[in-house]
Image (tube, rainbow, N blue to C red):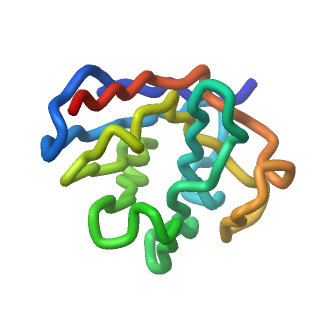
Amino acid sequence: QVQLLESGGGLVQAGGSLRLSCAASGLRFDMYGMAWFRQAPGKEREFVAGITWDGGVTNYADSVKGRFTISRDNAKNTVFLQMNSLTPEDTAAYHCAVIPTQFYSHRAEFFDSWGQGTQVTVSS
């Protein structure tokens, strides 16, 4: 059974930074692409960042490009999201997800395992 456990969320002031982690178990982690999505109250879930199985290719939503960095440590079965220059618009629950391919997608329906999420709140 695949399990994804996010951590690292919290309350931060605008301009601050957070580093999210997602620890995976129950799968050959180094075979699959991963992504971070977020969902704010009253809004649809949106793609934030994706990474291929080997970390060789990454992709970002335009709203976070240049501020967020996705990375992974296959030896530790963990994917990270470094978030800098946070704004109140980044406030959301952040979820990691695994897709059953070596690559990633912007579309949530292609991901078959999800974590429970970690809350990020950015105050102005």
Q: Is residue 63 above or below residue 79?
A: below
Q: Quadrant of residue 45?
A: top right
Foreground residue among 57 and 89 = 89
18 sits to left or right of 43: left
The x, y position of residue 44, in whole percent, is: 72, 40
Task: Residue at 84%, 54% (x, y): give it.
Answer: 110
Q: Quadrant of residue 78?
A: top left
Q: Is residue 10 above or below residue 86?
A: above
The x, y position of residue 48, in whole percent, is: 53, 55
Foreground residue among 85 and 71 = 85
The x, y position of residue 71, in whole percent, is: 36, 59
Task: Residue at 29%, 72% (x, y): give it.
Answer: 66
Task: Residue at 67%, 36% (x, y): give it.
Answer: 43
Q: In the current view of this chain or complex, which residue is farthest to the bottom? A: 57
Foreground residue among 58 and 10 = 10
Quadrant housing the N terminus: top right
Q: In the current view of this chain or complex, which residue is farthest to the front? A: 124
72 sits to left or right of 57: left
Q: Quadrant of residue 8?
A: top left
Count of marks, rendered view: 0
Q: Is residue 112 above or below residue 117?
A: below
The x, y position of residue 9, in whole percent, is: 33, 25
15 sits to left or right of 117: left
Quadrant housing the C terminus: top left
Foreground residue among 121 and 69 = 121
Task: Residue at 45%, 79% (x, y): give it.
Answer: 56
Q: In the current view of this chain or complex, which residue is farthest to the right? A: 109
19 sits to left or right of 78: left
